[in-house]
Amino acid sequence: MSKSAPDRRTGLLFVCTGNICRSPTAEGVFRAIARRAGLAERFHTDSAGTHGYHIGDPPDERSCAAALRRGYDLSDLRARQLRPEDFTRFDLLLAMDRGHLRLMQRQAPRAQHARLRLLLDYAPRAGLRDVPDPYYGGEAEFEAALDLIELGARGLLEALSRGPA
């Protein structure tokens, strides 16, 4: 969130292509782990897609099923598209892959580029930079994406718990 706004929570926006698989999963996972750590009140979270393919839709049922098996509820989330004001409204905009990051860098004012990161920047032990898109895969791909998202979300929470983004 803007530091001049009365809301002093750290604003986090998770971004993927259509906002129905990876980014809502990342939002739901981060919210849950922050809540379990007693830190939920410190953050404002949201997710968005670089494209408007699924505006208003709930997360993909396969994402919801994989998340629910691990105790994450995504049922209240709805897809939306990334908006210009998001670049100043959120403290960190976390891309699921380098393609999303490049699109965000082209759209964001240069002064806001420091807010743009990859989620897996917070999970160096994952050995990857991108969370692969599970959309055209099966259960194994959704589980693998969730594994990486959990690593990134835990690393992000740990980094933010130590201090400012």
Image (tube, rainbow, N blue to C red):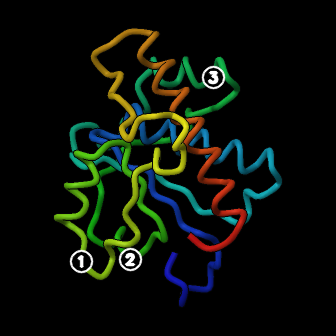
Do labels 2 and 1 touch, CB within 8 Å?
yes
Residue 62 lies in quadrant: top left
Counting from the top left corner in percent of width and height, residue 7 is at 62, 78
Element at label 2: helix
Q: Position of residue 152 (x, y in %)?
A: 55, 43
Q: Check the image and report above or below for 44 versus 136.
A: below
Q: Residue type at mark 1: give it.
A: Pro
The 10 Å Cα crowd at callout 2, few under 14, some 14 to 19, many 20 or more, is some
Instruction: Please tell me the numbered disc located at residue 68.
Output: 3
Q: Disc 1 to disc 3, how far (Cα)?
A: 37 Å
User: Extreme right residue here?
Assistant: 38
Disc 2 to disc 1, C-alpha distance = 9 Å
Pointer 1 or 3: first along the chain: 3
CA distance for labels 3 and 2: 32 Å
Q: Earlier in the sequence, mark 3 or mark 2?
A: 3
Asked whether, in this view, residue 132 is left or right of residue 52, the answer is right
Q: Residue 80 — which label?
A: none
Q: Check whether the beta carbons of the residues at disc 1 and disc 3 lie within 8 A of each other.
A: no
In the picture of the structure, the residue carrying the numbered disc 2 is 88
Label for residue 109?
A: 1
Rendered residue at 51%/60% (across/down): 12
* Residue closer to the observer: 68 or 15: 15
Which residue is drawn at the image coordinates 31% and 72% (left, top)?
A: 113
Q: Secondary structure at mark 3?
A: helix
Amino acid type of disc 2?
Thr
* Image point (32%, 28%), residue name: 133
Q: Residue at left 59%, top 62%? A: 44
